[in-house]
Image: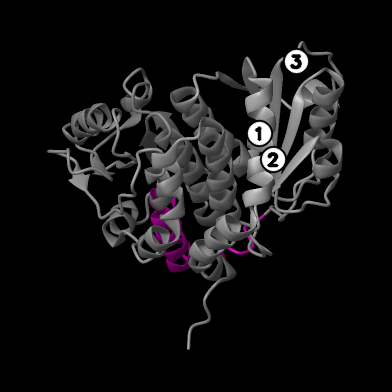
């Protein structure tokens, strides 16, 4: 009997983790949403690295689309190494870290509070140094995550952040879509794109594409290819890929496009078709493609929640691909679960 990886087990736990967040996280979300609504910030700054930074990219688009509040990522070294003073009055600082332990993230969150921002920690450890350094904490309730590759903490962080924005906006349609996610994510976890795995085969380089909030899952997918499969994967906005990167595309070059059901879907489909016409093997999560191949995907009840089902299916695919290459996705070489940078 083949033992399943911790990564596979944690992918299967994603629906339950999201349900647990929805059941246990309402008090945190409501308190922070009320405080944010009262502040009415002019901007949001995000502080994160790795998969958590991809969560912030996702929330950037959601904030700008829903609330009209611009979002910018601030390098943690601005606080931890340079110790700069920033003009953060009327600003909200959102620091995202599953462990809440990295010194640079903690330092930037602490400096943000010093410099006048409302500070929020989004973390899987409500007693962590990051939580202690922040004025408000949202516990993502993911439970222990033992595989080095983050899966359920990425999804629960994204859901928690999106829930905060929806509650802040009092957006009933989005709140309903968030509540419907556990069942949809369970269905998404059963999809693992064998045609994509076959197309990649022994190739060592590929592109992932996204647009709008789906760019965040493209970024996360490229990282996971590197972490778990030792593949060189680069993520691009579909609006940028033709501005130079497409030059390396040759016959059979693998490309994976992530599309949500929103205004960015048709433009992304058009670009993936153009790349497929150049001889690449292009797959996309949209039926609007003609030359590229539409792959199975779960649509949720809102364009802003669609990327969450897409990344769950991707996780299922990349775990299967990693193990097929004889790589243990639970223990990628040179990596450990908690990365502490200054």
Look at the image and give the residue range highlighted in magenta.
310-333
For the point 55% across and 44% down, the residue is 158
Q: What residue sits right under mark 3 in the picture?
A: 88
Q: Pointer 1: residues within 10 angstroms few (<14), some, or many (20+)?
A: some
Q: Main secondary structure of the magenta part?
A: helix
Image spot of residue 105 (x, y percent): 77, 35
Element type at marker 1? Answer: helix
For the C terminus, the quadrant is top right
Q: Which disc is residue 64 wearing?
A: none
Judged by depth in the image, the label closer to the viewer, 3 or 2, is: 2
Q: Pointer 3: residues within 10 angstroms few (<14), some, or many (20+)?
A: many
In the depicted structure, whether residue 328 falls above or below residue 105: below
Image spot of residue 91 (x, y percent): 70, 19
Q: What residue sits right under mark 2 in the picture?
A: 31
- Mark 2–mark 1 CB contact (< 8 Å): yes
> Would residue 278 appear left or right of 33 to someone viewing this image?
left
Element type at marker 3? Answer: loop
């Amino acid at each position: 009997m083949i033992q399943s990886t911790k990564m596979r087990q944690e992918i299967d736990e994603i629906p339950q983790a999201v349900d647990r967040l929805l059941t246990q996280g309402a008090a945190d979300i409501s308190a922070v949403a009320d405080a944010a609504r009262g502040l009415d910030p002019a901007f949001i700054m995000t502080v994160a690295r790795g998969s958590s930074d991809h969560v912030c990219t996702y929330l950037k688009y959601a904030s700008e689309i829903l609330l009209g509040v611009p979002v910018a990522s601030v390098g943690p070294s601005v606080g931890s190494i340079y110790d700069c003073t920033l003009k953060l009055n009327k600003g909200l600082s959102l620091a995202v870290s599953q462990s809440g332990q990295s010194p640079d993230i903690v330092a930037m969150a602490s400096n943000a509070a010093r410099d006048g921002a409302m500070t929020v920690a989004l973390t899987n450890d409500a007693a962590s140094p990051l939580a202690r350094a922040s004025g408000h904490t949202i516990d993502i309730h993911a439970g222990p995550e033992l595989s080095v590759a983050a899966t359920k903490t990425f999804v629960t962080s994204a859901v928690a952040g999106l829930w905060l924005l929806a509650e802040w906006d009092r957006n009933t349609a989005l709140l309903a879509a968030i509540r419907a996610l556990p069942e949809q994510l369970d269905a998404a976890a059963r999809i693992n794109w064998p045609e994509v795995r076959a197309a990649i085969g022994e190739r060592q380089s590929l592109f992932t594409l996204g647009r709008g909030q789906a760019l965040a899952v493209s970024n996360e997918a490229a990282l996971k290819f590197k972490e778990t499969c030792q593949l060189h994967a680069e993520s691009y906005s579909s609006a940028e890929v033709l501005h130079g990167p497409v030059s390396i595309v040759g016959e059979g070059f693998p490309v994976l496009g992530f599309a949500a059901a929103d205004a960015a879907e048709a433009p992304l489909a058009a670009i993936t078709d153009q790349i497929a016409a150049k001889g690449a093997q292009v797959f996309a999560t949209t039926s609007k493609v003609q030359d590229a191949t539409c792959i199975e995907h779960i649509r949720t009840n809102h364009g802003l929640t669609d990327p969450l089902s897409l990344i769950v299916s991707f996780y299922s695919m990349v775990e299967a691909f990693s193990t097929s290459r004889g790589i243990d996705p639970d223990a990628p070489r040179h990596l450990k679960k908690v990365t502490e940078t200054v």
